[in-house]
Image (tube, rainbow, N blue to C red):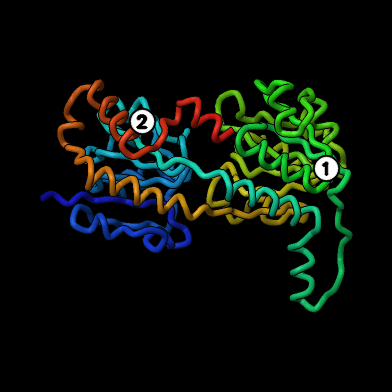
Amino acid sequence: MKKYKIAVLDDYQNVALQSADWSVLRDRADITVFQDHLADPDAVIERLLPFDVVCVMRERTPLPRNVIERLPNLKLIASTGSGNASIDLAAAADHGIPVVHTGYKADPTIEFTWALILASARHIVTESDSVRSGGWQQTVGTDLCGKTLGVLGLGNVGSQVARIGSAFGMNLIAWSQNLTPEAAKAAGAILVSKDQLFERADFLTIHLVLSSRTRSLVGTAELERMKPTARLINASRGPIVDEQALISALRNKQIAGAAIDVFDIEPLPPSHPFRTLDNVLGQRARNPAYRLRVAWSLQNLLRGYRLEYSQVARRPLELAKNREKQCLTNSKVRSPSSPAAQKELA
């Protein structure tokens, strides 16, 4: 029986093999975990050449066409989340490579959004560092009760974030391109215009899917509309905010601060301004369920549903599409382009 070679990429904290029971794959596959990140496409290709299956962690390592077409042994791509904009799905289909996704659990993002909001409002990191270094109170925190929470994207994540804001006694406003007054009201918020959202929010939190419509949706013009006391929260996707515009706004104290756990380039370069600006709270969250679900999906694919990878790789586009559909159905994971998946991430 052929043993497949599986690569797990960008496991920065070296927790992948402890986050799930991978023993179910022991007789079918050899698993190699990479903790470091490779940004150069040629280096990525060289590393992945021997592997049949590549497991990617969200958009950390992109798999564009010029990478996929140079990996002749690649027979399956497994990604965490409901969708992955950094995988060229057309290129994968052209080469008969199924792309499967683990699904997505919103709770950790909702919880972490509020960790960012509270830590930013109360200067938790600054005060903790002060205590550890022998100091004492350095700042005055900001109350949440009575403040306005602006939610950019009121989908499954944004609506739950809004409800928690209501529990703090905050005023809720929201905007997105397709948001209706009825949907906003159902989440306890008021639909406002985009300009009003940025002008009125004391805390503006972003919960959108990254797409051509949302890339750089928040730029110089939007940041200039924000109050000098306002704070921007982004636990969605880095490129939704124009990074250079945000750096400029923070350097000039145009807004009070930003709390972010998503970046244009990850890992964040050592010399990046976000590492030194005193009004940035930067933290990368981790959802342990992602790793468990990757192992679970591969267990189903390799043990239960017997993908004949060599046949898939040689046969036409129709077989690749049918195989991907079968894998998605059997593994109970959603296609990234499905309405349910898009709503889940929004």
Looking at the picture, how far across and down is residue 317, in whole percent? 25, 22
Residue hosting label 1 = 170
Looking at the picture, how far across and down is residue 211, in whole percent? 55, 28
**What numbered label is drawn on residue 186?**
none
Q: Residue furthest left?
A: 1
Going by the image, does 61 lie left or right of 186?
Answer: left
Q: Residue furthest front?
A: 186
Looking at the picture, how far across and down is residue 313, in whole percent? 20, 32
At horizontal 77% and vertical 25% (from top left) the residue drawn is 191
- The amino acid sitting under disc 2 is Arg
Q: State the residue in front, 264 or 195.
A: 195
**What numbered label is drawn on residue 65?**
2
Disc nearer the start of the sequence (2/1): 2
Q: State the residue in front, 266 or 318.
A: 318
Looking at the picture, how far across and down is residue 178, in whole percent? 65, 21
At horizontal 70% and vertical 50% (from top left) the residue drawn is 114
Going by the image, does 81 lie left or right of 243?
Answer: left
Helix, strand or loop under label 1: loop
Number of marks in picture = 2
At horizontal 74% and vertical 22% (from top left) the residue drawn is 181
Look at the numbered discs 2 and 1 and tell me whether their residues touch, using CB distance below 8 Å: no
Residue 89 higher or lower than 72, as above or below: above
